Image (tube, rainbow, N blue to C red):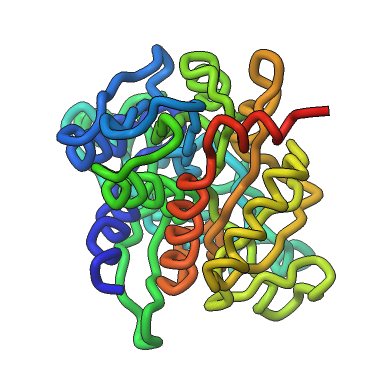
Amino acid sequence: MSEYRELLRRLSDVNGIPGFERRVAAMVKDELQDICEIRNDRLGSIICRLNSSGPGPKVALAGHMDEIGFLVKHIAKEGTIKFQNLGGWWDQVLLGQPVVIETRNGQVPGVIGATPPHLVDPDKANSVVKAADMFIDVGASDKETVEKLGVRPGDPISPAAACINLAVEDRMLGKAWDDRVGVALFVHALKRLNGQSLPCEVYGVGTVQEEVGLRGATTSAFAINPDVAIILESAIPGDVPGIKEEDSSVKLGEGATIYLMDGSMIANPRLRDLVIDVCEQNDIKHQFAMLSRGGTDGGKYHITAEGVPSIVLGVAARHIHSHFGIIDLNDYAATLDLLCKLLERLDADTVASLTAL
């Protein structure tokens, strides 16, 4: 699994909150510029057409480049910083966590703080602190010091969390698996498929601003107008305390995750069946997910133009939407194998059959 670690580590470590994904796009461009025709839409999504693919139906492999984060909202006179959430943060995971503010003068580290329990009313001491009552402390004692550091309203704030290999074999701890794991998948897939004879024209797409409304999916889908969309995502495993198996039977180490639906789309039934067939015919471990809330880029791709047959493939990631998550490289490898084998099957007749009456 060592061949996957380095790219996953670098993609996890790079900062790229919604609206500020350029570093991630630059990394994708650097990886693929020798084998792809690369362009971008005007919102910032990167579109990488595999030079050796096609002719045939256009297939988009979309993974979003953004991670949840914050923006500087207000600098108080005592030097603390109020922040605006970007994406679905859970208040419980914020307090005491390190962050980094990207300023015009460079990075400024800080920590998320709040009034300590010793100094709040006893009846509130055990209550969850709301994000609105938190602040970022960069060590300053006044507003002027913060401003001299280069901090100003609208600056992006990212979790400060370095990716590491865990002691458990093939498992990695890092930030932003939602959805740098999807970005890594299309990069590795295009590299593996480069030079092979494919029956379709393949596009790897790093979308922007998924976490704040699937915005890059809207513009990139319009730019490509694909015949099929394969959305590459993380998946929420149920192998931790507090989750019923009926709500998530996904487990780390049990293979690629096939989304039957999420809160924004239902998988095309014939494409779903084809994906399952590919898994069974190639002995690829797989599992299923059904997410009633929360959407993916598929929510926009599948309703582009006259409609696009779409499915979401995921890699299980524990603790998403927090500073750190855990993935298993065996799941990643299985998803990559599934993706590459699936693309070999998407010829013109097969794609036409996905929507035939």
Residue at figure coordinates x 58%, y 26% from the top left? 227
Q: Residue at x 34, y 55 (%)?
A: 12
Q: Which of these two is toward me, 36 or 39?
A: 36
Q: Quadrant of residue 119?
A: bottom right
Quadrant of image for the N terminus = bottom left
Left or right of 296 on screen, residue 66? left
Q: Where residue 150 sits: x, y (%)?
A: 23, 29
Residue 153 at least partly seen:
yes
Q: Could you say where residue 260 lies in the image, as x and y percent from the top left?
A: 74, 52
Question: Where residue 238 sits: x, y (%)?
Answer: 69, 72
Q: Residue at x 70, y 63 (%)?
A: 288
**Which quadrant of the figure contains the C terminus?**
top right
Q: Is residue 129 left or right of residue 328?
A: right
**16 to 234, vertically: above or below:** above
Q: Is residue 292 above or below residue 348?
A: below
Viewer-nearest residue: 2 or 73 = 2
